[in-house]
Image: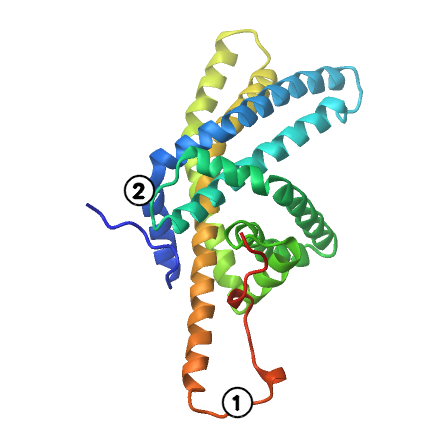
Amino acid sequence: MQEKIELKKLRSFGEIIDDSILFFKQNWKPLLKSYFYICGFFLVASLLVSIFNQDNTMRRIERGESYFSSTYFLSLFFDYVSFIITMLTVYSYISLYKEKGNEAPEVAEVWSFVKYYFFRVFGSYLVLTLCIIMGCVFCIVPGIYVGVVFSLVIPIIVIENSTLSYAFNRCFQLIKNNWWFTLGLVFVSVVIIFAATMAVGIPAAIVVFAATFLTKVSGLSVYSYATVIISHLLQFLYIYPYIVIAFTYFNFVEQKDDDNLLHRIMNLGKPAGNPSTVTTTAGETSPEEY
């Protein structure tokens, strides 16, 4: 039997990618079970609202009206909720996996975490999104920079049971000197998901082209509906980037803890200095108690 993946461990760039894939292979059944049980309702609701919005948008465009309507904003809201639930499910699963000693948690346990953190993460991610948008307005680069840094905020909130303010400061501490490392991991995980999406999207595009060619149905109409449906059905693929980010978080935590341990070992036997000069890390104290 293959040994279970240990989360909190120092890893190289390639090891994070490899172990995140291995983690998914070892946990795909309970993880996808949690995903479909918890996210299924929100996924279907988001899909139905998006299809209704697509139909309404096409009618409004034909009449020369703006596509910004109540259904458009309702669709954005449901997509956002579905996105938050998916992200929360993955991080809650990983947090419980760690707490249970590398054992897969039950759906009920994951759901209890999702309920507990939902409103905290819902508001926190909204604030982070606004900060990223503001950063992009100022020459794009600041938005990209904080976007990479903020990728660690939600894992910190869920795994460390922290507030947004604590997670905000903690993510900058963890990612210090590791920004390019994190960007590379995010980029590679996105490329993997893009490749998986294309593997499904290309055959679907061929079917859409054939349906358009063999019938009198508008090609744009068929393509628009197909895009909406496929994009929602493939949302489970985004589980993988969240796993990569979680492994990145654990890698940085272990890295910082090792540095702090080495610092304490090097200072053994030395007289205590001014308490105000003693360096501590955010990981040494918990912001909240369970």
Q: Is mark 1 on a helix, strand or loop?
A: loop
Q: Which residue is more in the foreground, 239 or 117?
A: 117
Residue 90 rendering spot, x and y as whole percentages: 47, 41
Q: Which amino acid does label 1 sit on?
A: Ala
Q: Earlier in the sequence, mark 1 or mark 2?
A: 2
Closer to the camera: disc 1 or disc 2? 1
Label 2 packing within 10 angstroms: few (<14), some (14-19), many (20+): some
User: Which residue is pictured at 48% across the width and 43% down the height?
Assistant: 92
Res. 56 visible in picture: yes
Circle 1 sits on which residue? 272
Q: Which residue is more in the foreground, 214 or 234?
A: 234
Residue 59 rendering spot, x and y as whole percentages: 72, 15
User: Which residue is pictured at 44% across the width and 58% down the height?
Assistant: 250
User: Which residue is pictured at 50% across the width and 92% down the height?
Assistant: 271
Q: In this view, does 203 lie above or below 119?
A: above
Q: Are marks 1 and 2 in contact (CB under 8 Å)?
A: no
Instruction: Single out the residue that lies furthest toward the left.
Output: 1
Res. 197 visible in picture: no
Residue 60 rendering spot, x and y as whole percentages: 75, 17
Residue 217 rendering spot, x and y as whole percentages: 57, 9
Circle 2 sits on which residue? 26
Q: Which residue is more in the foreground, 143 or 40?
A: 40
